[in-house]
Each structure stands twice: as structure tokens, then as C-alpha cells.
Amino acid sequence: MVQMDAVQKRLFEEVAGLHDIPEGAYNLRANGQSISRNTTANIDIRSKEDVSGIDIHVKAGTKNESIHIPVVLSQSGIKEDVYNDFFIGEDCDVLIVAGCGIDNCGSQDSEHDGIHRFYIGKNSRVRYVEKHYGSGDGSGKRILNPVTEVHMDEGSVMEMEMVQIKGVDSTNRTTIAELKADAKLVVQERLMTHGQQQAYSIYKVDLIGDGSAADVVSRSVARDDSYQKLDLCVIGSAACSGHTECDSIIMDNGRILAVPSLEANNIDAALVHEAAIGKIAGEQLVKLMTLGLTEAEAEEQIINGFLK
Amino acid sequence: MLELKNVSFNAESDGENVGIIRDISLSVDDNRFIVITGPNGGGKSTLAKLIAGIQKLSSGSIIFDGVDITDKNITERARLGIGFAFQQPVRFKGMTVLDLLRIASGKTLSISEACEYLSEVGLCAKDYINREINASLSGGELKRIEIATVIARDVKLALFDEPEAGIDLWSFNNLIRIFEKMRSDRRGRTIIVISHQERILNIADEIVVISDGRILKQGSKDEILPEITGTESAVNMCSKIQ
């Protein structure tokens, strides 16, 4: 890839699974600048003029195409706000891979605050994968504060996979969605914090159209002295169905506050929430130890499975 | 060969030190199919857990293949070739049947190899290989997967703690077939099953009756089974259901 050092390559691989330049449309951003971009006949990417960021336009009827927009920061002390807007036409079926990797070996904090707005056209289907990753042994913090806004038109479907497994010191994630009639949103969040890390994850999903549905599921692990607050709220303002679930494992001195919540504003809103927090069950460890694993290996396997 | 020498296990109950296993000595030769039976609360499951290292002895020693394993932990005993199937199999959120079989076998098991283990316990492999080991599996399905994990390990000594507990009659008939097959195809492996079931007792080389933490009787199937038939130590599935 163009103008990329080994650290940047590694970060791109972690957050977007990229070993090489991706197929289809992409915009690769490193240390505050767009370093490589490709558009296709159906997908256009343009830089914003007033603020940092891009507008992505997907033509109606675009099927089986992908858009990669990963970001990496490998210089210490960068702080950026980036606004990316996605305009998905009607009857599309696309994959969007975003994510941010920060390697901070210096003493200054590095921060990337990505604001993503999605406008999904009627009957379109979007799969969105966002991975966040931090590395580097400097004293400067690695901070990511993503905001995701999703506006879903009638009959559209969005599947979101939000993953943050390693190395991000502080994160404040906010996801807001609004669903019109027959739209469907499925969110799977996977979060692991360790060391002194703090993570706040807030979801507010508003079901405003009849027949809309949302399933927001967060699985998380808090290790060492880390803290998480999971605030998952589904609002039913029509004949709709919503489910929200926080399922967490705590280890060491980890702390978690789980606040799944529901608001029903319509007699036909069917809403369910669940939350569970607990340590790894002793019998799970014992079972895997009878298969020859050490206690530490058993713990890793249980967590890997849980966050898969 | 497995040798238990003067094994005792005490537990605290209401501030009192109660003997659960009392001075048991037992030798089990290689390539044997042993069934341990006896009344509920007699210490059978505890004995199996002491052998696997899940519980620690209060006194005595355990020798396995000439090695004193008394102070070895669960992992070390597993690596020496001791397998244990739980009476109540554990569930794992997110972990699939294939994941668990891979851990059990200790190698990068191919899907077709994993399927073989599932077929051995009467599960249609393609329906189960990617299933999560969670609440969506029935008791009988979990039990068979549990048994498959022990088969996948290819152990020298396999312990099964009440494999019939919590399963329905239909699954029970399949279970008997699994044990009959395991018995005829044991390849030098010693199998110890804790069970009250007459049909499992009926395929034993040797039966050990444990009551009140002690060995009450021990001998060949032909010798012991007539003595205990109709008692709590040897019931048939239907009478248990009634």
C-alpha cells in the first residue's frame, strides 16, 4: 500500500482485516490524512469541505459491493474529529467496514472521534463492521469516542458488529438509531476492557414505524481494574418489537454497570430487556481443566468463546 | 493401572467433620469396565471426583500407572490420561461443539474427525458441530456431547459420573448402546462408570458397591449383580421413572 509503514500496516490489518488494498470502494486514513481512495461506478467518496471527513454516496440498486474506511493513528498526540456521512440509496445490499486503530508509543494522548451518520434508503440492506484497537507502550492514552447515527427508511435492514477487544484506554461510544416502518436493526457489540480502562457504551434505538424491530445485544468482559457502563435503551413508539441484552463477565477488580432500559409509547410495542453480570463459573473452569487446560488457558478459552 | 490406597475424604457439615469417603482401597487393572454403584449419598460421585482431582483427598494416596498423583491437580491428571464426564454437563455461552471437541482432542481437529466423535454418541454431526453449548441444547444432547469430549481425548482411564442422570428413556436406550460400543472398542482403556442402572451394570466386568463411604461389595458382575438386583443399587430405567 502507498506511504505506509509497518505499524500502520499492522493497524489496518487489526481493524479492517486488510493485508492489501481492498476490493471495491475505500478510503484509507492515516495520521489525520486520507492516504488512498478508490471509488466505483456505484459508490462515490468525496471529502467534506467544511469539516474533516467524507461523504459516501451509494447509488440505488447497488448490490454486493463493499466500502472500507479504516483509520489509523501511529503518531503520538494527534487529536481529530472526523465526520463521515453515508447516503445509501434504495434497494442496495452493501458491506461497510470501518474501525480505528491507534498505536501510541509516546507520552501524549492520541484521540480519534469518529462521527458516522447513516441514511439508509428503502428496502436496503447494510452490514456494518466496526473494530477498535489500541497498541503501543507509551504513557499517552489511546482514546476513541465514536458516535454513530442511523436513520433507517421503510423496510431497510442494518446489521452492526461493533468490536473493541484490546488496548483502548478510554472510550465513550454513542449509537442512536431511528427506524421507520418494517425496518430492522440488529446490533452485536463485543467489548473487553483491561488495565485501568474505562468504557461507556450508550445505545438509544427509537422504533417509530409499525413493524419495525431492533435487537441490541452487548457481550462484554471487564478485567483488571477496568470499568464499563452499558446503557442500552429501546423506545417503542409504534407497533414494533424490541429486545436489548447486556451479558457480562467480570474478572479481577473489574466493575460493570449495566442499564438496559425500555420505553413503550404505544400499546402494541413489545419490548424485552435482559441483563446478566457474573464471574466465570467455577464448573466451566473445572470442565476445561479435566480436558487438560491450565486454569489460565481455560479462562482464555471461555472468554474467547463468549466474545466470539 | 489405578490404585487407591486408604483414601478418605471429609467435609464440613453443620460445623461437624463428616467422613464422606472412609478408608477406601481399590485396585483397577487396565482394560477393565467397572461400574460403581450403591445408594444415593454413599460417596460414589465423590470418589470419582477424587480420582480426577476435582476434590482433594483428606488422607491416603492414589497411584496411576505407577505415578503417585495424590498431589497432582486436575490439569496434570488430565494430561496423564484421566478423563471425566460430568453428571451435569456445563454450558458455555458462545463456545461451539466443535470448539469444545477441539480443546478436548488437544489438536486442530478437522471437521470430519469431530463429526466422527459426534456420530459415535449418536448425534447427527452436521446438525450439532456449530451449535453453541448453551441452554438451547437438551439434557440428553448435552450428555452425549459430554461423553464425546471424553472419547475425543483418547484417555487411558475414563470416568463417567451417572451418565443416565437427567435424560429421558429414549436417550437412555441410546446411551446404553454408546457404552456397549465403548466397552467392545475400548483399546486398552479402562472405563469406570458410576451408575445404578441394571443395563449398565449388566455390561460390567466388575461391580463395586459403595455405601456410607465404604466398599460394601466388590467382585465380578456374575457374582455381585444377583445380590443387588431389585435394590437401590440396581434399578431399571422404567422403575425409576415410575
Image (cartoon, helix red, strand yellow):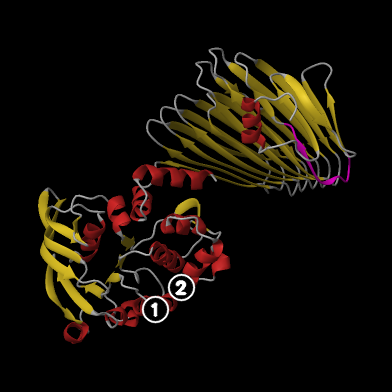
Q: Quadrant of the N terminus of chain A?
A: top right
Q: Position of residue A170 (x, y in %)?
A: 54, 23
Instruction: Decide whether residue B154 is among the magenta residues.
Output: no
Which amino acid type is shown beneath numbered disc 2? Glu
In this rendered view, identify the residue nearer to me: B32 or A85.
Answer: B32
State the SS at label 2: helix
Asked if labels 1 and 2 touch by Cβ distance under 8 angstroms, the answer is yes
Q: Nearer the viewer, residue A203 or B113?
A: B113
Name the residue nearer the viewer: B203 or A259: B203
To which residue does mark 2 refer? B120
Q: Pinpoint the chain carrying mark 2.
A: B
Which x, y percent locates residue B88? 36, 61
Q: Residue furthest right?
A: A41
The kind of residue on which mark 1 rests is: Lys
Is-magenta flag for residue A68?
yes
At a point 53% along the width and 28% down the height, the residue shown is A167
Closer to the chain start, of discs 2 and 1, is 2
Q: Residue at x 19, y 50 (%)?
A: B71
Q: Which residues are magenta?
A: A59-69
The local secondary structure at tag 1 comes to helix
Q: Position of residue B135 (x, y in %)?
A: 48, 57
Q: Chain of mark 1?
A: B
Q: Which residue is mark 1?
A: B181
**Crowd rating for badge 1 (residues with CA inside 10 Å; few <14, some 14–19, many 20+):** few
